[in-house]
Image: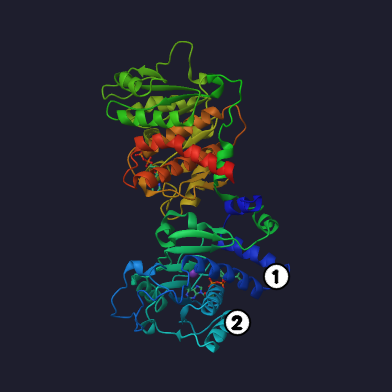
Amino acid sequence: MSDRQEQISQVVVTAEQMRDIEARIFAAGMPVVALMEKVAGLIARRIQNIYPNQKGAGTLGRRDTESSFPTSPRPPLFASSSLFFSNPCIGILVGPGHNGGDALVVARELYFRGYEIWIYSPFSQLKELTSQHLQYARSLGIPIYQEIEQLPNSDLLIDGLFGFGLERNLTDPIASAINQLNQLSVPILSIDLPSGLHTDTGEVLGTAIRATHTFCLGLWKLAFLQDQALEYVGKAELIDFDIPLADVEAVLSEAPRIKRITPITALSTLPLPRPAITHKYKEGHLLLICGSRRYAGGAILTALGARGSGVGMLSVAVPESLKSLLVSHLPEALIVGCPETETGAIAQLQLPTKTNLSSFSAIACGPGLTTDASPIVQQVIESDVPLVLDADALNILAEIATIPTLQKRQAPTILTPHTGEFQRLFPNITDVKHHRIKAVQQAAAQTGAVVLLKGARTAIANPQNQVWIIPESTPALARGGSGDVLTGLLGGLLAQAATKHIPVEDIAATAAWWHSQAGILAAQERTELGVDAFTLAQFLIKTLKSKLQLITYH
Ligand SMILES: NC(=O)C1=CN([C@@H]2O[C@H](COP(=O)(O)OP(=O)(O)OC[C@H]3O[C@@H](n4cnc5c(N)ncnc54)[C@H](O)[C@@H]3O)[C@@H](O)[C@H]2O)[C@@H](O)CC1
Ligand SMILES: Nc1ncnc2c1ncn2[C@@H]1O[C@H](COP(=O)(O)OP(=O)(O)O)[C@@H](O)[C@H]1O
Ligand SMILES: [K+]
């Protein structure tokens, strides 16, 4: 990957920013019509790659020509595969704007490459360029339909109804047409984004195309990184059409950056290679404070996550009754047994002599504590040590309402809530479910902490409004205990970075990226049902090794 590609793949834009960037390109002299040709040419070539036209190589599985609406039976899912169709029939859905224009250029190109094409163009008012392309398609004899009921069967649909120009909720008749198109068991490839999604929030504006594959054009739009958009987007792919970096910079320079974390950035944040002359305390000393008689496993999983980070020294404070269990799982760690409450929570921290909280390079506190360990959380907040607060530490924080004391901390703080913990902690931030990125930015600004909001697309914000988003993950991680592994891993990386000048949000993003990648690799090897939290921790180093190899070889 070139430097430019690496930088482009990190960029995330809103619809407004994309419009401004395009406006600069057009103002500089690039004709709109030429850009549309270029972009649509790239899309057409990708479609040819995915669904090659092997006309003449046999005619397995030919479709009938009668209408797919309203009563024709659904074609089988596998009908989409190029293995089954030598000459795929492609239906092109055309909207009123330039998204429709792109689709029409794709239609024309595929028509000339021998594909069987029909066009669905339900709008009477089209932008000038789109209208011209439609006229030309008509002159070529490509069938054009205005009514959904007229549409013939197809093996594939290309969605060019709306792109980033969609402004308001979709209404009938186009809304019901989209609903009917979604009912067909035909793969849908969306151009730029699935029609009906809000470009920034990923919200469904009335209804939206459920794409199997989306070609995001030029730069990643924010919607692709929003949890609520994922089931509409399908497999997402960026079509890079050579937007000059200078134009991107010019438009984004003032704005708080929202970035996708890439393997190169994540790996460059890791404490590798280690200096030849070092010792265990130079490689970070992490204190984990976790577990209770009720939740013993959480402490083990957090510690295994920390082990995966490679941290120099690991101390784990647990209730006394858990000590031997932890020792048996983590012989290398220093297990600190603490006096416990009647309920089996840590009652007070009893660190070894000559040790206090300031002796550690970082502290990670919370998994499995129960809310009975409240004084401990207060104590760690008052320390001057970089701190990760997760799980019950966040619930305690919500109960004791000490957000203002977080602001006063001298050392960095990272909060790692899932959506439920987030809502308890920040009841004044509404709509975290629908505006996750805005919500995480507000939370970071309110607390002065780095906030890592867990989810399908984990987002990390710093108090300066900058955001990192983890662009890929797996639902295999939606499983008890996987968050504990992340807390340990993050704590371990934070401890190792203590003497280095790496922004804390970069460390949080790296930990979340590594955690997701481990989930992805484990799911590939063991299926999505095979990624229990213990297994996930075992995959951390294996994943790191495979990612480092990829970087070395490219
Ligand atoms: N100009 C170019 O040559 C390029 C075009 N691109 C394509 O252009 C798209 C943006 O084009 P546009 O700005 O024309 O916008 P769109 O094609 O996304 O749609 C805008 C059109 O839809 C109408 N509209 C908006 N909301 C509606 C609603 N709820 N119901 C009915 N009609 C509605 C608007 O009045 C306008 O006519 C991108 O998504 C991309 O596909 C770029 O990707 C590449 C360069
Ligand atoms: N659908 C999903 N896709 C990808 N990752 C997910 C999904 N659901 C959960 N995760 C990840 O799994 C982890 C779950 O953490 P958390 O909710 O704290 O669980 P626990 O407290 O049981 O350890 C987080 O890192 C989260 O981002
Ligand atoms: K679209």
Is residue 105 or residue 335 the one in the foreground?
A: 105
What's the CA distance linking mark 2 and mark 1? 18 Å
Q: Is residue 320 left or right of residue 97?
A: left
Task: Provide the secondary structure element on which disc 2 rests.
Answer: helix
Residue that carries the numbered disc 2 in the rendered image: 128
Q: Is mark 2 within 8 Å of ligand 1?
A: no
2 or 1: tag closer to the N-terminus: 1
Whether residue 490 is situated above or below residue 439 in the rendered picture? above
Q: Given the image, on which type of amino acid does mark 2 rest?
A: Glu
Q: Residue at x 51, y 41 (%)?
A: 547
Q: Where in the image, quadrant-wise, is ligand 2 located?
A: top left
| Residue at figure coordinates x 43%, y 60% from the top left | 234
Say if residue 477 shows up in the picture: no
Q: Nearer the viewer, residue 439 or 146?
A: 146
In terms of image quadrants, where is residue 23? bottom right
Image disc number at residue 30: 1
Q: Position of residue 167 (x, y in %)?
A: 51, 69
Q: Residue at x 40, y 65 (%)?
A: 210
